[in-house]
Amino acid sequence: MGTLESKMGWEIVEEEWPDFKGRIFKNRPKSLVEMLENTVKNHADDVGFIRDDLRLTFGAFNAIVNRIAARLQKVGVEKGDCVAILMGIEIEFPLSFFALMKLGALAVPLNTRFKGEELAYEINDSESKVLIVDEEYWTYIDSVRDRLKTIEKIYFNGISIPQGTIAFSALKENMDDTFTQHYPSETDSAVIMYTSGTTGKPKGAILHHRGLIATAMHVSDFIMLKPGDKLICCVPLFHITGFAMVVLSSVFTGTPCVYMKTFKVKDFLEIMVFEKVTKIVSVINIIWLMINHPDFDKYDFSSFNVALLGGSPATEEMVNGIKAKLPHLNLSVGYGLTEGHGYDTSTPYEDALRKIKGIGKVLPLVDIKIVDDNGNELPTGQVGEIIIKGPKITKGYWKNPEATKTAITADGWLHTGDIGKFDDEGFLYLLDRKKDMINRGGEKIYSLEVENVIFNYPKVLDAAVVGVPDIILGEVVKAVIVLRPGESTTAAEIQQFCAERLADYKVPKFVEFIEAIPRNQAGKVIKGQLRYIPK
């Protein structure tokens, strides 16, 4: 319903693979390796990667990729092997990634905000053979190094090389670029991207070449990337947004991308103007912070013409505020999830204000239905679960057939767990999220993980964790706690306890102490009664 057409006029055809039959862009690269080779052929001397004073052409980038691939192959990385990458927003990430693609290996991007135990779980679960890590995250890896069961080699991107690791420069500056190149098929696995669920540990969504390319093409088509454009990457590369929607779109189109490792609003303003960035794919919070900076009016943002936004809720106040400060900016709010390789709906620019509460229309290669609890499609206007089908659906969850079977139906529909509805113009509305999920500025947090940590605090008797509204981040974490009889503590002590065990964004911003957690007759917490900000 309400499916968008290709803005670039790209031909869409029906094709069939062993796992899926449906719509796909006709003229597409058949793998990420082919995608890079096409761009090198057409844009070898064009700058593609920018970080500070570094300007790297697509041709030079590809030469380094080949040297990294050659060295990794010599140390035993083969087709089907997993390699974990713990890196920030920097060029070394896509260099490593494309080297792995040329070997037929799988990249496992790790959350740079995770602590030791969280990182160890994903490294071990993915059975990663090699780890590539930035020096700023080394402390967390070092704390669990003896628990990394499958890691054979660690490449360290930094100055002071820890004992037992190898300098990343040994990969990057390797002069031998001879290796046996693998040419993946469209349905070959490329990435294991861990995504938060509503219960238990993160699950590794298996992403494939076809889906990643389709997302890169969807983005490139909708925002009409063309010569003269310039992107900026300021969202993490372990996210589907930063990785597939920004980096891969840049490579697909031969468009330069500025890599901003550390986001600071003032620096962001200066880079946007100095580099004459034209388009951005990010969470809306970044643009909101931008327009609310006290120096905003001192800068000329006339080059900035498109913002494709998602990941966290776009409030009416935000959209109106952005349009008031940047009236020439084409704004689109979209929706997607890791299991769908990101980006499934988008709002036409002309409807950004008129459909301010929606999350857009369905993109060309995607099918979306609203269904009831029995899987029956619901008519327009009725509320139910959003389910998605298309060439971008995950192959399933790594080593988790039960979760895969629960999420994906036999005929290929992905159950998102999100609640929504269509209006009579084909616009999709997101009304609720996965049960107990908190969305903090695009970072998805499941309550159970935070609750489990709090329950380990000896003075706690009972606890519940919910998301509460925040004007900048959409939601932040709130913990509601019942103490054991006779015990006392403070919010600061609880927050410190959590900070030692969880990534910083998972630490509760608010802590409230009450006498009893509200529960229904089945013993389940009535979380709706807890979603307010304590005074």
Image (cartoon, grey):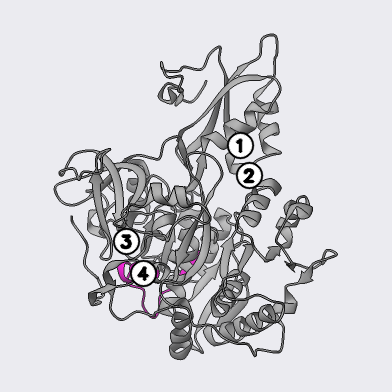
Left or right of residue 177: residue 50? left
SS for callout 4: helix
**Distance in Å between CA atoms under marks 1 and 3:** 38 Å
| Residue highlighted by disc 2 | 503
Disc 4 and disc 2: Cα gap in Å? 31 Å
Query: Measured along the vertical axis of the image, is residue 452 above or below residue 23?
Result: above
| Pointer 1 with pointer 3, Cβ within 8 A | no
Label 1 SS: loop
Crowding at mark 2 (Cα within 10 Å: few <14, some 14-19, many 20+): some
Residue corresponding to mark 4? 214
Mark 1 touching mark 2, by CB under 8 A? yes
Q: Residue furthest right?
A: 163
State the image coordinates of residue 94 (x, y, percent, origin top left). Answer: 56, 72
Q: Look at label 3 and name its amino acid.
A: His
Residue drawn at the location 66% of the way across and 52% of the way down: 119
Q: Earlier in the sequence, mark 1 or mark 3?
A: 3
Q: Are marks 3 and 4 in contact (CB under 8 Å)?
A: no
